[in-house]
Image: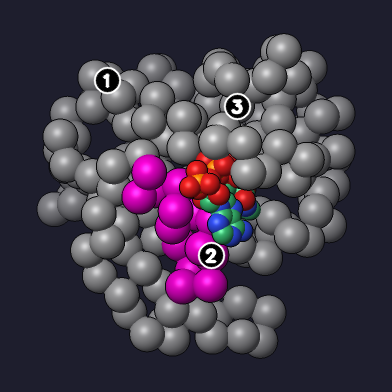
Amino acid sequence: MKLRNWSLEDLESLVKYANNPNIAVNLTNGFPHPYTEEVGRGFIKMAMKGTPKNILAITVDNEAIGGIGLHLQDDISCKNAEIGYWLAEPFWGKGIMTKAIVKIVEYGFQNWDINRIYARPFGTNIGSQRALEKAGFTLEARFEQTLFKDGIYYDELVYAIRK
Ligand SMILES: CC(C)(COP(=O)(O)OP(=O)(O)OC[C@H]1O[C@@H](n2cnc3c(N)ncnc32)[C@H](O)[C@@H]1OP(=O)(O)O)[C@@H](O)C(=O)NCCC(=O)NCCS
């Protein structure tokens, strides 16, 4: 598994893997279902901006099989970045995301003047919670029924790791 920059050549594999309701159900509405070519192209163009890159492709044999990003916060939250990620379903349960999280945390603390990286998985997303814990994150808070997606309320968990 490697992390590298996104390229428009990844569009086909991005749409193939991202167009999956089992992935979208655990993400914000910014990751739609169906996941169309137009959405994918817009995402890749956005991910190609910025230096250093804060949104990276997760690859195996140079094929993009997922995405991971650090979203730098501003104003009084300027020392924080929110991490977000997804992996193609055929690759789940092989420890890939745990490794990807460890790598981007190291990259984030090296490249930006931040001291905390946090994630906000749904309370129902056990896989994401386990990957965060295995990557060294700590559960800092649980907000009950704060998130609302597709007609369902979810608990919002806050996991974080400090520099
Ligand atoms: C959540 C997700 C990123 C996990 O990726 P992954 O590469 O399968 O995770 P890992 O293999 O590194 O798993 C880490 C641990 O969690 C466990 N785990 C993974 N998925 C699980 C699940 N659905 N239920 C229970 N445990 C799970 C693994 O077994 C592993 O523990 P182990 O090493 O003790 O066996 C992936 O399922 C995904 O992309 N889901 C959809 C999008 C998403 O949820 N993104 C995160 C939003 S916060």
Judging depth in this view, the residue of 71 and 75 nearest the camera is 71
Query: Mark 2 = which residue?
Result: 125
Judging depth in this view, the residue of 8 and 139 nearest the camera is 139
Q: Residues within 10 Å of mark 1 (few under 14, many from 20)?
A: few
The kind of residue on which mark 2 rests is: Asn
Is 134 situated above or below 120? above
Q: Residues within 10 Å of mark 3 (few under 14, many from 20)?
A: many
The kind of residue on which mark 3 rests is: Ile
Q: Residue 44, position in %: x, y? A: 66, 30
Q: Residue 19, position in %: x, y? A: 82, 49
Residue 93 visible within the image: yes
The answer to which of marks 3 and 2 sits earlier in the sequence is: 3
The answer to which of marks 1 and 2 sits earlier in the sequence is: 1
Judging depth in this view, the residue of 49 and 1 nearest the camera is 1
The answer to which of marks 1 and 3 sits earlier in the sequence is: 3
The answer to which quarter of the image holds residue 148 is bottom right
Residue 47 visible within the image: no
The answer to which quarter of the image holds residue 136 is top left
* Numbered label attached to residue 111: 1
Depth check, mark 1 against mark 2: the one in front is 2
Q: Main secondary structure of the magenta part?
A: helix
**Could you tell me which secondary element the residue under label 1 belongs to?**
helix
**Could you tell me which secondary element the residue under label 2 belongs to?**
loop
Whether pointer 1 and pointer 2 mark residues with C-beta atoms closer than 8 Å, the reply is: no
* Numbered label attached to residue 58: 3
Query: Residue at image x 62%, y 36%?
Result: 94
Query: Residue at image x 40%, y 18%?
Result: 51
Question: From the Cβ of disc 1, is ligand 1 less than 8 Å away?
Answer: no
Q: Which span of residues is magenta-colored? A: 121-134
- Calculate the distance from the C-alpha at mark 1 to the C-alpha at mark 3: 19 Å
Query: Residue at image x 61%, y 77%?
Result: 149
